[in-house]
Image (cartoon, helix red, strand yellow):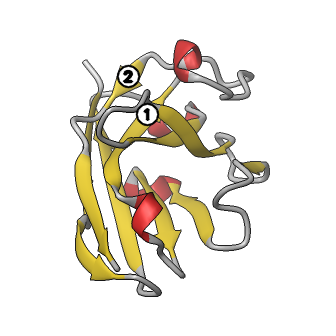
Amino acid sequence: QVQLVESGGGLVQAGGSLRLSCVASGGTFSSYPMGWFRQAPGKERELVAAISWSGGSRYYKAFVKGRFTISRENAKNTVYLQMNSLKPEDTAVYYCAATRDSTRRISSGSDIDYWGKGTLVTVSS
């Protein structure tokens, strides 16, 4: 059973930075494409960024491009989301997610096999 555990959320002022981490256990992390999703109050969960199993391919939604960076350390079974220049509209629960299919390009929640429980990011104005 694959488990994903996020950490690093919290309260930050607009313009500030946070780094989220997600540690995986119980599976072959190094072969899983990974993604970060978020869900704001009253809104649907949406993809923020995704990374291939090797880290060689990365994808960002337009609303975070240039501000957020996704990365991974396969030796540590960990994926990161560095978030800079945070805005109040970035406030959400952020979820780490994985797919078993190493060839899959994550584009939506339907691509996901495993979810973390989420970590709350609150950006004050």
Q: Marks 2/1: CA distance?
A: 6 Å
Seen at 59% across and 60% down, the residue is 70
Return the disc, 2 or 1, that comes first in the chain's sequence.
Answer: 1
Residue 8, picture quadrant: bottom left
Place of residue 95 in the rendered image (x, y in percent of width and height, measured from the top left): 36, 41
* Residue 37 vertical placement versus 12 (above, below): above
Going by the numbered disc 1, the residue's amino acid type is Ala
* Residue 111 in view, yes or no: yes
- Residue 5 placed where, x, y %? 23, 45
Which of the 4 quarters of the picture holds residue 12?
bottom left
Mark 2 belongs to which amino acid? Tyr
Closer-to-camera residue (37/29):
37
Query: In the image, is 84 to the left or to the right of 64?
Result: left
Which residue is denoted by mark 1 in the rendering?
97
Image point (47%, 30%), residue name: 98
Front residue (pair 98, 39): 39
Q: Nearer the viewer, residue 1 or 86?
A: 86
Describe the element under mark 1 as helix, strand or loop.
Answer: strand
